[in-house]
Image (tube, rainbow, N blue to C red):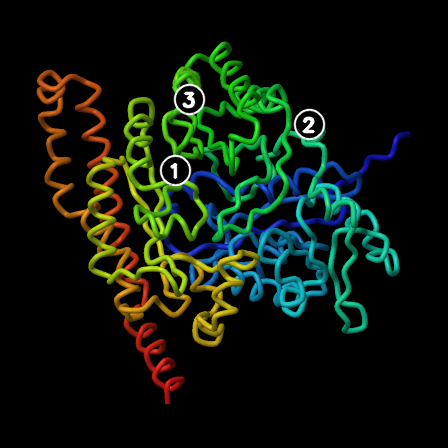
Amino acid sequence: MIKTIDKNDWPLFRMIIPVSDVNVFTRQARKTTALGPLMVATAANKLWGWRVEVIDENNYRKGPRDSNGLPDHTVLQKERPATAVGFYCGLTSTMPRVWKTAEFYHRQGVFTIAGAWHALYCPEETLNHNIDVVVHRDAEKVIQQILSNLEKEKFLENISEISFLENGQFKTNTSEIAQISGLGPNLNRLPFPDFGLLRYAKIKIYPINRIRGCSGNCEFCSVNEKPHWASPKHLFETIKWLVETRNAKEFFLVDDSLKEDLKGTTEFFNMIADKYGNRLDFSIQLWLKIAENTEFLQVIKKAGVKIACIGCESPINEDLKVMRKGYTSSKMLEWIKVLRRYLKVHIMLIAGYPLKERDVFLSAKEIIERFREFIRNAHPDSVHVMLAGPAVGTDLRKRLEKNGRLFPLSIVPWNKYNGRFVCFKPDKNMSVRELQGIPFKIMGRFYDFWSFVRISRIIIFPIDCLIRRWKPGHRSWYKDAVKSGGYLLMRRWKRKQQVNQFIEELENYQTTCRE
């Protein structure tokens, strides 16, 4: 007689994606998930003897909640006790939530694992907040090693690319080869992402990925990994599998830099166009200069790419120079004009970027006018303006730290590092209160109340389409719909953020320092 294996007796690995504050992507976050932690969970699920689940606190429906409306991990742990828990630390602003949740699991005797950018650059800090091990960079292989050997004594010493505490002392196992090359696993050998591992979530927009890393040298970016990628066919097979098994129709290509393998990217979208035409919807991240390659733009349009998210960063040439972007504001406008012929364009901007001592400083009023003028001339479909965030691991943070311009974490904690709060002393001719208000004043002109009035023409939309033709009429209405949503979101931000209290604390701190 064959003995039946009860998989419910197997230990459980729970991957947690911590909740983020309300932001421009909040609505989308309820329809998708973070791909990195899902891939780690997928790799863990290939291990014999382990069950795996993913809790995305940003996309969490009908699960148990605590008094704050957040996922109730006490109930989750009672229902399905986890032996090991992984935490996604890709966003610095979510670290307080990671620490609080890790404290609960640590008290339960659960083995805690952390990975992604913040944990990578601040491993010792992370380990001192109830985390047992920090994984460096790509974790698909390492997570299998950790879980496979979890019950062995001193098993961490035999695993590379991790940090941990041993007898209270910080210890790192790092491969010199990996440090030099920066290469992760062979991406062609990774399994397809298993979205079925998500609990209490609903996926409408499927994140996909082919290229990891970026060869750019932006001062404000912490992605300094040498680019490596999967074959176009591997990504195409991933899409095909998701369409066939999950009836997937909308995708977001999360690659940081498609230009790293433009030939392969073009081949992938040609394969999509040949198989599906433009029946699938794709959103992608593009770099501005691709506007010079109209052949590529024609290919992606034919394949169903609808929206391009573009990091314009700033319309101020002085900012662009310090950021090390390598182009000018006037050139950006030329490129955006071309891109808008093929795609809906969402632009992302950084306001109040900290310049260097020798640079010419602008007042807050001048910055706002320059940004507004750029947006008027660019005619984007949507806009996101944030303050410069000196993220861990960036040259920007190192420069500000060296010059004594970073506010201490006791005044500006990690949860403020979300692009909506001042984290450093502003440039000359500007106060912290003026800097804090810049993004809202810029976006307030774009996401205005009058969009509700304009959107009401849906009542006479058929007539409007006949007069102005479908394409321009539809795009104009779409743009006003986005503006209406943005207006409501900004009002929600203002209600949730205690900005005045925060600014008063910064002003008092500055006054105390001067005294």
Q: Which mark is residue 188?
A: 2
The answer to whether 154 appears left or right of 221 in the picture is right
Amino acid type, callout 2: Asn
Tag 1 near tag 3, CB within 8 Å: no
Q: Which residue occupies 10% across, 31% down?
A: 457
Q: Residue 235 in the image: x percent, y percent? A: 59, 24
Q: Position of residue 462 (x, y in %)?
A: 12, 20
| Percent coordinates x, y for residue 41 in the rendering | 65, 42
Q: Earlier in the sequence, mark 2 or mark 3?
A: 2
Under circle 2, the secondary element is helix
Q: Which residue is tagged 3?
A: 293
Question: Which sits earlier in the primary sequence, circle 1 or circle 2?
Answer: 2
Give the crowd class for mark 3: few <14, some 14-19, many >=20 residues within 10 Å.
few
Image position of 10 with respect to 331: above or below: below
> Which residue: 70% across, 41% down?
140
Q: Quadrant of residue 169?
A: bottom right
Q: CA distance from mark 2 to mark 3?
A: 27 Å
From the viewer's side, name the closer residue of 300 and 251: 300
Estimate how packed mark 1 is, as few (under 14), some (14 to 19) or many (20 or more) residues with alpha carbons within 10 Å. some
Quadrant in which the C terminus appears: bottom left
Q: How many marks can you see?
A: 3
Mark 1 and mark 3: span between their CA atoms?
16 Å
Report the amino acid beneath label 3: Asn
Question: Dot 1 corresponds to which residue?
Answer: 310
Q: Type of residue at label 1? A: Ile
Circle 1 — which element?
Answer: strand
